Amino acid sequence: MEMMARLVATPSVSSVSPSYDQSNAAVIALLAEWAEGLGFTVEVRDLPGHPGKQNLVATLGQGENGLVLAGHTDTVPYDEGRWRHDPFRLTEDGGRLYGLGVADMKAFFALTLEAVQGLGPRPLARPVVLLATADEESSMCGAIALAESGRALGRYAVIGEPTGLVPVRMHKGILMEAVRLVGRAGHSSDPALGNSALEGMHGVLSDLLDWRAELQAAHRDDTFAVPVPTMNLGRIGGGDNPNRICGECELHLDLRPLPGMRLTDLRGELRRRVERVAADRGLAWETRPLFAGIEAMETPAASVLVRALEDLTGSPAGAAAFGTEAPYLTALGMETVVWGPGDIAQAHQPDEYLALARVPRTVGLLQSLIERFCRD
């Protein structure tokens, strides 16, 4: 409880907006101190190009093919004035623990360290690795740097994102793109004086909606609550006055692909469709990523880790619509499952909370997991 309280009390907001963005170094320092006190070998890695951002890799035990218990140290910004409880003070109220990041997902670090502390004296046959990353909620720079290092940390990885202690072996990807068309402004009294980017975007929108229908007809997985890929046309802007032909127009869209759908393929198809519409109308065009994107993730149902978590929790592994750092850990050769004590419905919300009853259960399950993968 003391560790959770100190983690919640240490701000570590990450945001694409510089006015909100903060360092995570103070959280990393706390985790490093506690891990060293338990006998872990601790590495703190600064992230080049991201001042004040750090990853932590703490290893207990020797050998290979260990178990990685992973999470991100950052939180989203919070809505000042909408919290009933202080977001930076762990508050117990009505069987719940309130605080910014307590569900998503600072508490997982404290519960992991508590589980390790409670292990018996028998030595580990394979290592336990505590992995803490930066900026999952914004740039993913921590996970990207880890993947680019190419260093394998273990054979199995559990990411403690909020899943209500139900193992998640699949999640959708995230692709957020901007589409920009450039035409020619002119006086609205004579259409021949310009070339409307806004009317051109109407053609792009129609084509994208057709593409969405094609994707949903071709791809389906009923494991997901929303079993098809989704495309949201989230923002549009263009022009400056009703009596001027619109010279520029920009659209922002969000596409959530299913496992098996690659971001590079989707970006290529988006470019081809925009290029075709723009060429027909004589418009300049570009598409650009709004962020690097997250690949969809799928760990096979027959995975040893999936089956172990199903056995320990009594819950079949499922799928999630939200993205995580799992694809980056999978790229390093680890079987990865998302599993943590919080609930996704509480993430990013005022008065974020973790059910108090989940605390001892999570510690016990983590100890059983460590026993199974690092001792037996």
Image (tube, helix red, strand yellow):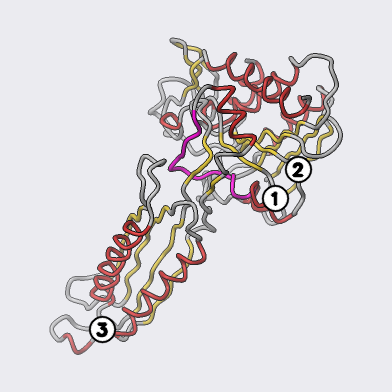
Q: Residue furthest left?
A: 189
Label 2: which residue?
153
Horizontal side of 39 relative to 159 (left or right) equals right
Give the mark, 3 or 1, whose residue is nearer the N terminus: 3
Q: Is residue 151 left or right of residue 253?
A: right
Question: Residue 309's x, y, as percent?
Answer: 59, 28
Location of the C terminus by quadrant is top right
Secondary element under disc 1, as helix, strand or loop, is: loop
Q: Compared to 42, does 253 lie above or below?
A: below
Decide whether residue 251 is among the magenta residues. no
Q: Give the quadrant of the N terminus.
A: top right
Q: Secondary structure at mark 3?
A: loop
Q: In the rendered structure, which disc, 2 or 1, sits on the residue that comes first in sequence?
A: 2
Quadrant in the rendering for residue 41: top right
| 321 in magenta | yes
Q: Are marks 2 and 1 in contact (CB under 8 Å)?
A: yes
* Residue depth check, mark 3 versus mark 2: number of the one nearer the observer: 2
Q: Would you name the residue on which mark 1 appears?
A: 332
The answer to whether residue 73 is left or right of residue 278 is right
Range of the magenta residues? 316-328
